[in-house]
Image (spheres, rainbow, N blue to C red):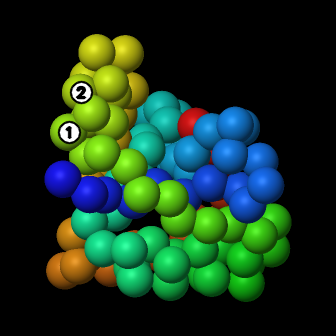
Amino acid sequence: FKMYIIVIDGNEDRGAYSVADENGENVLYIWESEDDAKRFCLMLEESGSPKMKEIEVDGDLLIESCMTNGYLYAIISSDDLVVPPEEHDLF
């Protein structure tokens, strides 16, 4: 199934957008809605990030890869309200 992650436009090989949780571990944000991912890109850019873009990914494959490699992830549904934290990183 289709899902979306956020990357720096032109630097896709640097990794996907993630946020540090309360333990300092990176959590990969995975969006169910392309429109929600686009809105989050705009919010990131307004907060001073470089130009960002959403890319479509295979949700099953990405989640399986995260689980295999021990990466934390959060699936952002259309019902979730997320705003960029003051500090963020690339995964």
Q: Are marks 2 and 1 in contact (CB under 8 Å)?
A: yes
Query: Of the residues shown, which amino acid type is indicated by label 2?
Result: Glu
The numbered mark at residue 64 is: 2
Which quadrant does the C terminus fall into? Answer: top right
Looking at the image, residue 56 lies above or below residue 59: below
Residue 82, horizontal then vertical, whole percent:
40, 74
- Whether residue 32 is visible to the viewer of this picture, yes or no, is yes
Q: Residues within 10 Å of mark 2 (few under 14, many from 20)?
A: few
Q: Amino acid at mark 1?
A: Asp
- Residue receiving disc 1: 60
Crowd band around label 1 with a 10 angstrom C-alpha radius: few (<14), some (14–19), many (20+)? few
The answer to which of 23 and 36 lies nearer the viewer is 36
**Which residue occupies 50% across, 84% down?**
39
Location of residue 73 in the rendering, given as x and y in whole percent from the top left corner: 33, 41
Q: Is residue 86 above or below residue 91?
A: below
Q: Position of residue 71 (x, y in %)?
A: 38, 26
